[in-house]
Image (cartoon, rainbow, N blue to C red):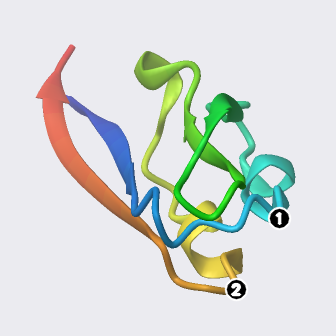
Amino acid sequence: MAKIKGAIVVDVERCKGCEVCVGACPTDVIGMHEQVNGKGYHYAYMVEPDACIGCTNCAIVCPDGVITVYKKKVAI
């Protein structure tokens, strides 16, 4: 039996900090970073990386397409 482990990569410089991805995440993995990008926006990042299930909700709702989701099977 395998479990799916997910991870997201956010294009920090293109993220405008709209926080739509934060609300779309069923496992509360995503938060907004305290630092700002080159445009002055707080950007999304993985607060709880181990909780990501790779559902892709964040990437689907992102209006600018700055989130890439990776998935891999891990043995339990």
Position of the C terminus, as image quadrant, is top left
Residue at 26% across, 55% down: 70
| Marks 1 and 2, how far apart at CA | 9 Å
Crowding near pointer 2: few (<14 within 10 Å), some, many (20+)? some
Q: Is residue 23 left or right of residue 67?
A: right
Residue 27: give x, y in percent of width and height.
69, 32
Position of the N terminus, as image quadrant, is top left
Residue 46: give x, y in percent of width and height.
51, 32
| In contact (CB < 8 Å): disc 1 and disc 2 | yes
Residue 63's place in the image compared with 13, above or below, is below
Ranked by sequence position, the earlier of labels 1 and 2 is 1
Q: Which image quarter: residue 17?
A: bottom right
Q: Secondary structure at mark 1?
A: loop
Residue at 86% across, 51% down: 23
Residue 15: give x, y in percent of width and height.
59, 66
Q: Nearer the viewer, residue 75 or 69?
A: 69
Q: Which image quarter: residue 63?
A: bottom right
Q: Which residue is mark 1?
A: 18
The amino acid type, in three-letter code, at marker 2 is Pro
Residue 35's place in the image compared with 7, above or below, is above
The amino acid type, in three-letter code, at marker 1 is Cys
Disc sitting over residue 67 in the figure: none
Q: Secondary structure at mark 2?
A: loop
Residue at 44% across, 23% down: 49
Q: Which residue is mark 2?
A: 63
Residue 41's place in the image compared with 59, above or below, is above
